[in-house]
Amino acid sequence: MGMVRIEGGSFRMGSDRFYPEEGPVHQVRVDTFWIDPTPVTNRDFARFVRETGHVTTAERAPDPALYPGADLSMLQPGSLVFRAPQRREDMRFWGDWWHYVAGACWYRPDGVAPLSDDRLDHPVVHVSFEDASAYATWAGKVLPSEAEWEFAARGGLEGADYGWGDDFEPDGRRMANVWDGAFPMGGGDGGGFGTSAVGSYPENGYGLSDMIGNVWEWTDDFWTDRHPDEAHKPCCVPVNPRAALAEESYDPRQPAIRIPRKVLKGGSHLCAPTYCRRYRPAARHPEMIDSATTHVGFRCAWRMPAASGKVEAAPAAGKGDRNERNP
């Protein structure tokens, strides 16, 4: 299937150097799995839609029952689109550059113009968790767990800040598609909506592209505000850990909205050193499962059916010793 085999191993998951939700750092072990070398592209997703007739979340009107008190005129098919503010006075809060645009969807990224041929090899965007899961099922794959995703993104580098080391731009070289300039007034180097064709930046140590930047990627774990405290205990190591309680993932700031949130990983073309330094393997972000935006995509994984949340005595720290492309 053109996937990359990631030999199982243990690693130190999370970070204590950036944002609180990334801690505590703890030892985790994952079994061998396979993962796509790039995010799913518009070309890939178009084939899926042709063969299945799938209608994405962004193409359907939201259910008013899920959004009590919402303006009914806003509950129409569409998605969140990033538009840079024109004046510095518009930089007060994120609502000045994120807009719900009627008609925006994966094949009409800005809500106006149809997807152009030169963007077929860009990551598909405006896909919800449901859309990503449907694609994975059609492809005979799954969405990766948060631990699998982070293990793969590190590329065999133990504890490094970035997927290529501790230097953001080694020797001045851009290593990922992240915001270039003073966010949010201008920047991004992919043209148009900021995404770039997959594989435009260097692969990591496992031969994976765009694990950092370009688009945030869905994982199959429900959101938690921090990694579990018990994971920090030295006595044992979680094996293939999963966060599986939907009710614990609800946004406490919106108590009337009972929509589960999943973990996004990797950052996007909208992450900037001056605003959001989440273009790192340890970084994580919550997203409601019905959300779709111009900077969220996904990639798929495949694993042996036996992989599930076990706990074992702590082994010596180490990394996978062989990672190769699956023929």
Image (tube, rainbow, N blue to C red):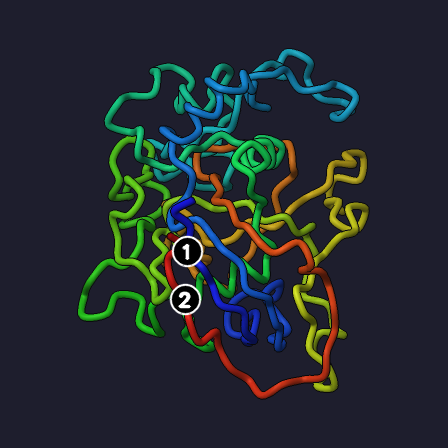
Residue 239 lies left or right of residue 270; in this view the side is right
Residue at x 56% of width, y 60% of height:
148
Give the image location of residue 279, x and y in percent: 42, 57
Q: Nearer the viewer, residue 225 or 49?
A: 49
Judge whether residue 259 can be spotted in this image: yes
Residue 230 lies left or right of residue 262; in this view the side is right
Residue at x 72% of width, y 56% of height:
243
Label 1, label 2: how far apart the Cα atoms are:
7 Å
Give the image location of residue 115, x and y in percent: 34, 21
> Which residue does the numbered mark 2 point to in the structure image?
323
Give the image location of residue 151, x and y in percent: 51, 65
Asked whether disc 1 touches disc 2, contact meaning CB atoms under 8 Å apart, the reply is yes
The answer to whether 283 is drawn above or below residue 199 in the figure is below
Tell me the number on the disc at residue 4.
1
Give the amino acid at mark 2: Asn
Mark 2 Cα shell of 10 Å, populated few (<14), some (14-19), many (≥20): many
